[in-house]
Amino acid sequence: MINISSTFRSVLLSYSEIFFLKSSKSGLILLLISFLNPNLGIAGLISILTSFVFAQFVGYEKEFLKSGYFTYNALLVGFSIGQIFALSPLSIIYLCIASVITFLVNVSLADVFSKYFGLPILSLPFVAVTSLIYLSASKFSNLYVNDLYSAGHIELLSNTFPIWINGLLRSLGAIVFMPDPIIGLLILLLLVFQSRVLFTLAVTGYYFGVLLQGAFVGSSVNVFYDLNAFNYPLIAMAIGGIFNIPSIKSYAFAFTGVAMSTVLIKSIDIFWAEYGIPVFTLPFLLITLGFNYVLSLLQYKFKVQVFKNTPEETAEYYYTQQFRYSQATPMYLPFRDEWSVYQGFDGEWTHQGIWKYAYDFVKRNSKGLTYENEGKSLEDYYCYRKEVTAPCRGYVAYAIDYFVDNPIGVVDTINNWGNYVVISDSRGYYVGVCHLAQGSLLVKAGDWVEAFQPIGLCGNSGYSPQPHIHMQYQSSTYLNSVTFPFSFTGIESNKEVFHHHLPDNGESIKPYYLNDFYFQVTNFVLDEILKFKVYDNDNFIENIEFKVKMGLDSTFYLERNNGRLYFGKSYSSFYFYHLEGDDKYLKLLYQSMPSLPLSFVEGKTWSDVIPRKFLGDFKQRAILGLNAMFNYSTEKNAKYKYDSDITISGKISGYSNNDFVETQIVLDPYVKFKEIKVGSVHLRTV
């Protein structure tokens, strides 16, 4: 059966998708705007509901349809037909047939484009189907005789503004087939409140396009009457803020795309006019898809992979992910006690060129020395013949331990790596651990090893001026092969613990060990329900529930109302990854414990990032959005610590040094979260 509430939200998201927004509130506003022309508004609604009914009839689940991505093209087709034909039994049948065709084309093209090109389909189904519909309609004389409709335009503001403002407003209105100033003004106001990035790109993209087109044709005034110019703001928004992280470079891409479209619009207009078909969004499609494909081939790092509600939220999500999670392969330390970094990436001595991604480790005393006495014998060095462990899980590809340990002052220039173990990492590629002691290996080629499993002892073999461990992540079993970036996970350093970290030279580090208790606390069963009573300053507010659900991609999340808080484990830590929707209590849970070391590390703290959309009022978020247009940055704004093995306290900074909120969460292996506190709000397990 069709869930009315869920379907209505999906319908609203179909409307918001037209302007690249993912907000049901924006969708509701656009739905209401469309009904300023009732014939067009009803046609659009019939078209999208027809798609939903057909999709449910053939077997698509509501989860597939909920985003609006597979139905907004049908909405546009409905608008295009509602602009031409008055609603009647015959035109409604025609409209429903077109909607079903659009849905089939949409799903088919989406699969092909995603699988073979890695591209979105945008409004391609709308352009294809509407062009065919317009051609067929020209032969359906009965439709024209009985149902031809002259859409009434709202011209209340047509004489209020000069033509250069009316041109912008009418072009924005033309995107929803209502080229009227009042419609465009409402859309412009919607963009202002939803996304300053999209508003700025829409306005500047439009004026850049029409002025350039005016220069080509020799009349800037006439260009403001060209409704095909609605392609300019669409291209600018798509390239500059939607498919690329907003930045100076993405804006340059956007204006380049707009400039290219001035040529395409006129050429397509001349060709399509032969068949009586409008240009529609074809220039927008060709330019936007072209940029997307080329930037994908170049592996442009600021190309958006995860789309959020607005460009501002997408940028914040991108930079937060970069900060919170390792962008390189996580590795465990190759030892189980405290060591010191002797040389890191791109080091002063040997870690250079294609071999720059490597670490050397030694042991030091309180004075920073790596040896006792005079340091003339191997036994004087603190790390000599100390245990070395596997930094990852996998098969041992090579294991050699027959080279002698060099006396201090002597190096082996022929067998540079000395005794070593190469592990075929189960995630791909290889890890080399070198300069091990002669005859000390505990593994052999073909053995399976787990992280932290002893594999040998630290030595001074190969090109090694003093006993140390060398570790690198490489492309093949050959130790001279190209090295790759990696990071260390589960590290204690000074007074902090790190989920992922690249320690500096001289930094003392040691691993923290995973504890079964924290695995149990963060293990959730599908459909498990967490029940809480909510208090504010000890005043009871309401009872709430979080339900454990799983998405189509096998990701787990806690759900309440339309909010989803995604979670999971990553090596040494548990994370609440991100929040979809705006549920205030899921937001509190995220703030109280965005991440958790899967071990009790007494007296140590760890830092994290709370997205800025969770903090401050609308004005503050708007200011942050303006800053994000040119120079977005993410920094640690929350710090947490274990008060006991079950209690975690935190402090989240706001927008000034004196603005912060304190948090606390109490863990329990059975109910998961016994208590959650953020500021004055307190959630207690029922």
Image (cartoon, rainbow, N blue to C red):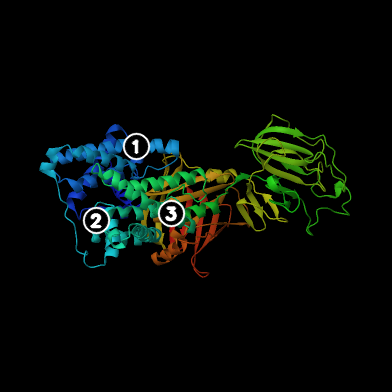
Q: Amino acid at mark 3?
A: Thr
- What kind of element bears circle 1? helix
- Asked if labels 1 and 2 touch by Cβ distance under 8 angstroms, the answer is no
How many numbered tags mark residues here?
3
Is residue 621 left or right of 348 when viewed as pictured?
left
2 vs 1, front mark: 2
Q: CA distance from mark 2 to mark 1?
A: 29 Å
Which disc number belongs to residue 256? 3
**Label 2 vs 3, first from the N-terminus:** 2
Front residue (pair 264, 341): 264
- Mark 3 surroundings: few (<14), some (14-19) or many (≥20) residues within 10 A: some
Which disc number belongs to residue 107? 1
**Label 2 vs 1, first from the N-terminus:** 1
- What kind of element bears circle 3? helix
Read off the residue under disc 2: 179
Q: Amino acid at mark 1?
A: Val
Question: Visible in this render: residue 546?
Answer: no
Q: Position of residue 679 (x, y in %)?
A: 46, 63
- What kind of element bears circle 2? loop
